[in-house]
């Protein structure tokens, strides 16, 4: 299965968190499970992602939630419209992002993000994402996304 982000056309693939064309980016990869209607990303933070010794920086966690959720929005919208991301790439931008830090997230273990859509309506998709470290829910996010189209933000 190909990661959702790898379906983004080159002009939309420069994001720091998920853009495959950003040489300094995180290059996260999100996978959609059609049967469950949810997405999954796994990411292991590096030592430079430290907030205080032993814990992950909150800004990184927000970035992971954001980028994972945009990919979830694309996959959910494609499924709702019955289209393939391979043939019809979809991309979204964040209109709103709320992140709740429930517990400190330890630095070291692989993190698991699981996303589910709450609403798909027109160009708007609402996604809820949970982030787990060693099976413990540490972060919960909810975001609103707006679908972008060809020619978006051209200079």
Image (cartoon, helix red, strand yellow):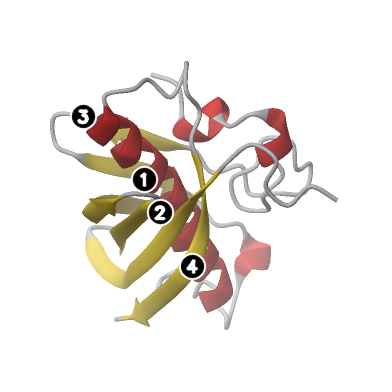
Residue wearing tag 3 = 34
Circle 2/circle 1 CB separation < 8 Å: yes
Q: Residues within 10 Å of mark 2 (few under 14, many from 20)?
A: many
- Residue 72's tag is 1
> On screen, 125 above or below 49?
above
Q: Is residue 107 visible?
A: no
Residue wearing tag 2 = 69
Q: Nearer the viewer, residue 144 or 42?
A: 144
Residue wearing tag 4 = 95
Q: Nearer the viewer, residue 35 or 73?
A: 73
Image spot of residue 38 (x, y percent): 23, 42
> Of the residues under marks 2 and 3, which one precedes in the sequence?
3
Q: Quadrant of residue 36?
A: top left
* Badge 1 element: helix
* Badge 3 element: loop
> On screen, 81 above or below 38?
above
């Amino acid at each position: 299965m190909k990661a959702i982000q790898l379906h983004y056309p080159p002009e939309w693939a420069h994001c720091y968190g998920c853009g495959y064309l950003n040489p300094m980016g995180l290059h996260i990869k999100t996978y959609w499970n059609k049967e469950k209607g949810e997405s999954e990303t796994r990411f292991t933070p590096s030592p430079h992602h430290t907030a205080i010794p032993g814990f992950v920086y909150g800004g990184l966690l927000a970035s992971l939630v954001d980028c994972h959720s945009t990919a979830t929005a694309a996959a959910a919208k494609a499924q709702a419209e019955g289209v393939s991301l391979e043939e019809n790439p979809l991309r979204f931008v964040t209109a709103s992002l709320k992140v709740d830090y429930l517990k400190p997230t330890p630095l070291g273990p692989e993190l698991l993000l699981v996303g589910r859509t709450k609403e798909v309506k027109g160009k708007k998709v609402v996604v809820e994402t949970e982030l787990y470290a060693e099976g413990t829910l540490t972060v919960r996010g909810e975001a609103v996304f707006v679908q972008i189209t060809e020619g978006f933000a051209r200079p």
